[in-house]
Image: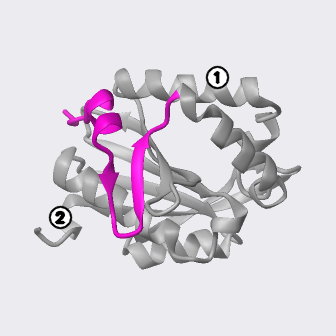
Amino acid sequence: MLLIPVRGEVRAHPFESERLYYTPVEPIDGADIWQAVDLSRETLKLWLPWVAFTIDLPSTTRFAEACALDWDQGKAVRFSIRDKGTRAFLGVVGLESCVHVHRAVELGYWLRSDAQHHGFMSEAVRFALQLSFRHMGVHRIRVAAATDNHASLRVIQRAGLRFEGIARQAEWCNDRWLDHAVFAMLSGDVAPA
């Protein structure tokens, strides 16, 4: 069984890393998410099919409501990424598709355009991996990125996930099929704390 952190406790006492803090995505975050997606639409739509369906504040608020429900039901754990200094919303890092019997999750993430290329996502991914293996009892984390999404692939490789193969035409996004490079990390791959 996975050990899902209590959402209310994490909201009251956010997780932190060097430059960032992490709170559960909740309905109150809808406006921040909407603004970040809308301002970053041209970049995000290349790699994330859900961007096309993020059409207004109500749709984004519904997503944030679903995030809270998914967390409480143990289906996914999604965090708002915020800058520790400014408290600005930067993006989302999440542990998706939680399969308790196999202790497996899928890693997902995105950043608003103006926050990219500053190492924030690498920092957030390290946080998610540590949380998963050291606190949630995860055995396997899987992540996939489009084979031509070089920025995302660099984040994955920096984090030390192992390449497992190519999923051909894995996703329809922005009027084209994307091949995915698939990576994973096992709890045994991580050095003890």
Residue visible at 52% across and 60% down in the picture: 86
Q: Which mark is residue 62?
A: 1
Is 142 left, or right, of 112 in this rendering?
Answer: left
Q: Nearer the viewer, mark 1 or mark 2?
A: 1
Q: Earlier in the sequence, mark 1 or mark 2?
A: 1
Residue visible at 49% across and 36% down in the picture: 25
Q: Which mark is residue 41?
A: none
Front-most of residues 100 and 15: 15
Residue 19 lies in the magenta-colored region: yes
Residue closest to the far right: 175
Query: In the image, what residue type sits under mark 1?
Result: Arg
Front-most of residues 25 and 156: 25
**Occupied quadrant, residue 58:** top right
- Mark 2 lies on residue: 188
Helix, strand or loop status at disc 1: helix
Residue 139 lies in the magenta-colored region: no
Question: Taking 174 as reference, is 161 above or below it?
Answer: below
Q: Which residues are magenta?
A: 1-26
Q: Position of residue 78 (x, y in %)?
A: 45, 41
Front-most of residues 113 and 179: 113
